[in-house]
Image (spheres, helix red, strand yellow):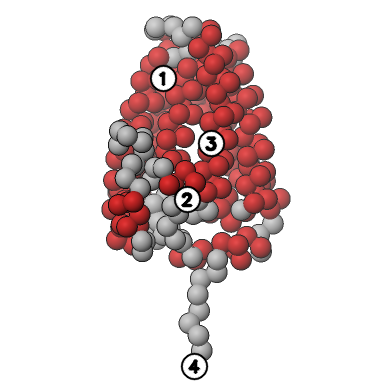
Amino acid sequence: MNAPLRPPAPAAIAAVLDPAAVALRISLVILAEAALLAGILFRGAGTLDWEWAWALFLVAGASGLPAVLGLARHDPALLASRTRMAPRDQPLEDRIFVPLHTLLVLAWAWVTGHDAARLHWLPVPEGVKALALLAVPAITWAGYRTLRDNPYLAPCVCVQEDRAHRVIDTGAYAVVRHPFYAVAIAYQAAAALVLGSVLGLMGTALIGLTFAARIGIEERFLMRNLPGYAAYTRVTRWRLLPGLW
């Protein structure tokens, strides 16, 4: 009697991927997203003469590129999974969430640019901008570590059966159940401060609330479809912020 076929492990999938090709593909995706975001940001500002915006993109690129290269070498399958189309098992609520969230982030970029360069509503002190800029590499590193901790971290809610998906409960995932969302919120808050927009910071808080809604979608799906996830939620109590939620 033949043994049942088992899905290949992430390491087996990574072995057949070309890290250089994966790094190039994800880099092109990131550059396209950054170009779109920058275009809307500068459109809202009405000018390209914006030193803090250029400084943010420079520091973000300089800290993000090593992270991409490191992940491509360590886990190319993870990066490859982040450029795939929506899987068939993605719940309807998440299919609705993803484009709405994208539109909200693009609106955030326009409002932030308009506020920082035109409205000047509650200006952010230069020292605060500098500290926020210095925080960007540290936040990028935290995101890199989170991706290293969880090789199944996909941009959509799904179970990656082809990659032997299992519950991750080590590293940052031993502290909170959704550390990557915490990193994303911190990154956007730092960006709003660097750009000098309190309205952008308020927009970041709104986007954080949408992440809270998505956590509900994700956890309901994983409890039904990923063995061991319900037990994990009982051990790791906090979803996003230790001691708060």
Label of residue 200 in the image: 1
Q: Left or right: where does residue 156 sit relative to residue 230?
A: right
Label 1–label 3 contact, CB within 8 A: no
Q: Where is residue 77 in the image (x, y as percent from the top left)?
A: 58, 56
Q: Name the residue under label 2.
A: 170
**Label 1 to label 3, Cα distance in Å?**
22 Å
At label 4, the amino acid type is Met
Q: Mark 3 points at which residue?
A: 142
Q: Left or right: where does residue 168 sit relative to residue 27?
A: left
Are there few (<14), some (14-19), or many (20+) residues within 10 Å of tag 4?
Answer: few
Q: Residue at coordinates 29% horizontally, 61% vertically from top-left? A: 224
| Res 104 → quadrant | top left
Q: Position of residue 169 (x, y in %)?
A: 43, 52
Q: Name the residue under label 4.
A: 1
* Label whose residue precedes the other's in the sequence (1 or 2): 2
Q: Is mark 2 on a helix, strand or loop?
A: loop
Q: Residue at coordinates 39% horizontally, 6% vertically from top-left? A: 122
Up/down of 109 relative to 29, above or below: above
* Label whose residue precedes the other's in the sequence (1 or 4): 4
**Label 3 to label 2, Cα distance in Å?**
14 Å
Up/down of 244 relative to 175, above or below: above
Q: Where is residue 94 in the image (x, y as percent from the top left)?
A: 34, 48
Q: Which of labels 1 and 4 is toward the front? A: 4
**Label 1 to label 2, Cα distance in Å?**
33 Å
Query: Foreground residue, 204 or 21?
Result: 204
**Label 3 to label 4, Cα distance in Å?**
48 Å
At label 3, the amino acid type is Ala
Label of residue 239 in the image: none
At label 2, the amino acid type is Thr
Q: Where is residue 173 in the image (x, y as percent from the top left)?
A: 44, 46
**Label 1 to label 4, Cα distance in Å?**
62 Å
Q: Residue at coordinates 47% horizontally, 34% vertically from top-left? A: 183
